[in-house]
Amino acid sequence: AQRVTQPEKLLSVFKGAPVELKCNYSYSGSPELFWYVQYSRQRLQLLLRHISRESIKGFTADLNKGETSFHLKKPFAQEEDSAMYYCALRGGSNYKLTFGKGTLLTVNP
Amino acid sequence: DAMVIQNPRYQVTQFGKPVTLSCSQTLNHNVMYWYQQKSSQAPKLLFHYYDKDFNNEADTPDNFQSRRPNTSFCFLDIRSPGLGDAAMYLCATSRVERDPPYNEQFFGPGTRLTVL
């Protein structure tokens, strides 16, 4: 079975502060991990995926297989980063996604 | 330009009255998904179509059914909505290739269903 846990329902930081949204997963094989984001009044959209190893909007995420984590980080949060963030996992040859419950990030001015 | 369109955005129905939600896509993707999302919960996959092949999740209630008459359209039918079926329903699409087996899912804006 595959499971994604986002321990923080809400996260509030000030503009310019570092931010880290936590994601832990449970999967016996080699997973593929993603972060999806939903800005206010917008649809859910892909932010980044671990195999791309790229930084999107200043966000990065590293897959740590030892700790089964895929935390999303940004060194300096901006107000426009305020959104709902979902971590998602795809396992093996399965193309379906399992989502976490999401973390609502608020960046205060 | 909308790529995954869901209609209506808000749907109100009565307890036990059948309701249909629709999803259309302009991406020509081969896979279409339906998710149910309740407040403060993860999107939960109900079923998906891989081309014309219907794939039901094991825990999806029989009350939920789906149709995909062509590549562009997919419908979610709730035969007898209960109060517990009130939720946001998300449609998503992806182009799934054999290798790699996954491609990005594109989501619609969702339909919020209220059951009175």
Image (spheres, coloured by chain):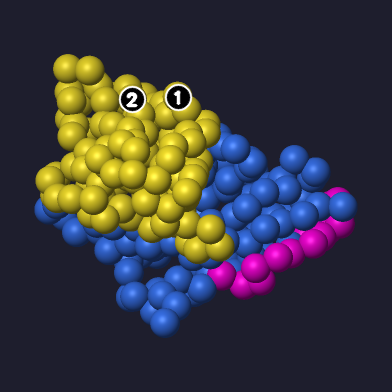
Tell me: residue B71, above or below residue B13: below
Chain assignment, label 2: A
Instruction: Check residue A7 in the rendering and tell me which mark sits there, or answer none.
Output: 1
| Residue occupying image coordinates x 35% and y 29% | A22
x%, y% of residue B29? Answer: 32, 69
- CB within 8 Å, label 2 to label 1: yes
In the figure, what tint was chain A given?
yellow
Mark 2 surroundings: few (<14), some (14-19) or many (≥20) residues within 10 A: many
x%, y% of residue A13? Answer: 44, 37
| Residue occupying image coordinates x 42% and y 57% | A80
Question: Which quadrant would residue B31 be assigned to in this image?
Answer: bottom left
Sequence-wise first label, 2 or 1: 1
Tell me: residue B4, above or below residue A89: below
SS class, disc 1: loop
In the figure, what tint was chain B given?
blue
Near-viewer residue (A79 or B66): A79
Circle 2 is placed at which residue position?
A24
Q: Is residue A79 left or right of residue B30?
A: right
Tell me: residue B65, above or below residue B82: below
Residue B65 drawn in magenta: no
Q: Is residue B29 at all visible to an observer of this figure?
A: yes
Q: Which residues are magenta?
A: B6-18
